[in-house]
Image (cartoon, rainbow, N blue to C red):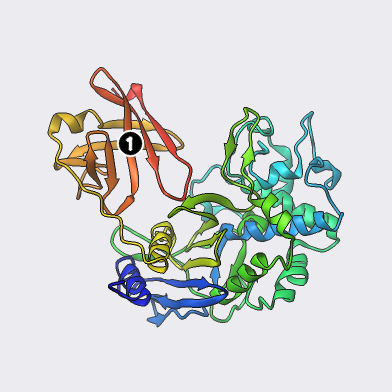
Amino acid sequence: MQNSIEDRIDALLAAEIEPGGPGAAIAVIRDGKFIHRKAYGLANIEWGVPLNPDAVFRIASLTKQFTAVAIMMLAERGQLSIDAPIETYLPDWPARGRTITVRHLLNHTSGVWRHDSDQGDRTKRPNPPVEDVIQLIYSQPFEFEPGERYSYNNSGYMLLGAIIAAVSGKPYEDFLRDEIFGSLGMDHTGLLRHEAITPGRAYGYVRGRKRFHNARLDAMSWSHAAGALGSTLDDLAKWDRAIRSHRLISAKTLETMLAATPLNDGSNFPYGFGWGTANYADRRIFHHTGGISGYASHMLHFRDEDLTTIVLSNLYLFPFDKVTRGLIRAALDLDEVSPATIALNRDQLATCAGRFGGDYEREVFAIEGSLAFVENGAPALLSVSPTEFRQADDPENEYRFSDLRDGLYQRFDYISPLWPVSTFRRDASAG
C-alpha cells in the first residue's frame, strides 16, 4: 500500500468536507476493534466547535434495523408471528379486505399509505402525538396490493413500533431501552428529542446555494420507529458486535432478516428486514442509510468477514455512499476506480440528451463535450463508450443508455455499486 489507511481516509474526508463547515464522524471496525475512529469538520459552525468521535447524531433510518430486530426478538420469544395479519396485534387496524402481515411491513411491500410521501417542506409539518400519526395512516387508502412491489415505506415502520408497544406492553422507546440499549451498554442511544438537552449532540446543517444553514427541525412524531433515534460511533460499534455475536437474535433469525424479499411476480428485491443487501468488491454486505433534516448516516457490515464501516454526519445529503465505498477500499487496500474515458462528438452526445422519468425526473444535457444533469457548470458525466458514462466526481456510478430509436436513446440505467439498478425512460412529451 502506498498510503496508510489513516492517510487514505483523511484524504477521502478532506475532499468532501469544507473548512469551517459541518462534517462527519467515521469508523472502520475489523474483528471487533476500531482500525479508524475519527471526526472531521465542525459540530457547531457558529461557535467553531470541532466534531469529536463521541458526538451524538440523529441516525434517521438506521433506526429501522433496531425496530426490525425488536420485532424478531418478540418473534423468537413466541410473542408474535411475522406472518400474522397486522390486526392480530393492532385490533383497530382497518384491513378493508386485505391481508397485510408484519412481514409486509418489515420488507416494505405492504402497500400501506406513506404518510410522508408528500415531501414538500417536511419541516413545516405539525408535531402531533405519534398516536395521531398512526390514526392518519389508518385512515388513508392503500397504494398497491400487498407483495406487489417494493416501495420504501416509513409508515410501515411506524406501525411496527405500535406493534412492539402492543405486544410487549411497553412504549416503543422503553422496549428498546430496556431490551437492547441497556443490555448492550449503548448509553448514548435513544429517541433524540428536539427539546431534550443531549450532551455532545452535533448541530444539524443543510447546504444552501452559497453557504450552510441551520437545519430546520423535522417533526419527531413523523419518524419515530422509522427514524427518530440518535446514537454515536461507539454505541453503533456495540450494536455491530451484538448482531455479529447473535446476542439479541439467533444466527438463523439474522439470515431470515437478510434474505431477499420475494414479490408476487416471482422476482426478488435485495432488501430484507431493516437492512438492504448487496455485493461489493466481490463480497456480500448488508447495510442501511439514514437521511433527515440536518443529518445523514450509513452503516455497512460485511457478511462473511468481520469488517464494518460507520458514517455519521451533521450535514443533510452528505455523500455517505461515496465515503463508505472509500472506507472499504482503504480497509481492503483496493485501488481507486479510474476508468479510461473517450471523447464523443456533438452528434453522439445528442443521442443521449433529453428528459427522462423514473422514480423521479432527470434531464440530461449535452454540454462542453460531455453529458451533465445541470445546464450550467462543469460536466458531471465522463464517457467510457458511446453508451456508457461515469459520474465525474464518483466514477463507480455508471449511466448506461440503450434502446436507440429515431436517433435518440430511449432509456438509461443508473448503476451504483451498493444499490439496485434504477431505470429511466425518455419522456416523449418533452419533445
**With 369 as the anchor, is 254 left or right in this view?**
right
Compared with 313, 65 (above or below) is above
Q: Write down the quadrant of residue 98 in the picture.
A: top right
Identify the residue at horizontal 45%, vertical 40% (top origin): 421
On the question of residue 44 being in view, the answer is no
Kind of residue indicated by mark 1: Arg
Viewer-proximal residue among 72 and 362: 72
Compared with 143, 235 (above or below) is below
Q: Residue 298 appears at what percent x and percent y?
A: 50, 61
Image quadrant in which the C terminus is located: top left
Identify the residue at horizontal 33%, vertical 68% (top origin): 12
Q: Residue 80 appears at what percent x and percent y?
A: 84, 51
Identify the residue at horizontal 26%, vertical 44% (top origin): 374
For this orientation, the residue located farthest to the top is 406
Image quadrant in which the N terminus is located: bottom left
Q: Residue 28 appears at what percent x and percent y?
A: 48, 71
Q: Residue 143 appears at what percent x and percent y?
A: 63, 33
In what element is the residue under mark 1? strand
**With 360 as the anchor, is 306 left or right in this view?**
right
On the question of residue 389 being in view, the answer is yes
- Residue that mark 1 sits on: 400
Viewer-proximal residue among 368 and 334: 334
Q: Write down the quadrant of residue 214 in the picture.
A: bottom left
Viewer-proximal residue among 270 and 391: 270
Number of marks present in the image shown: 1
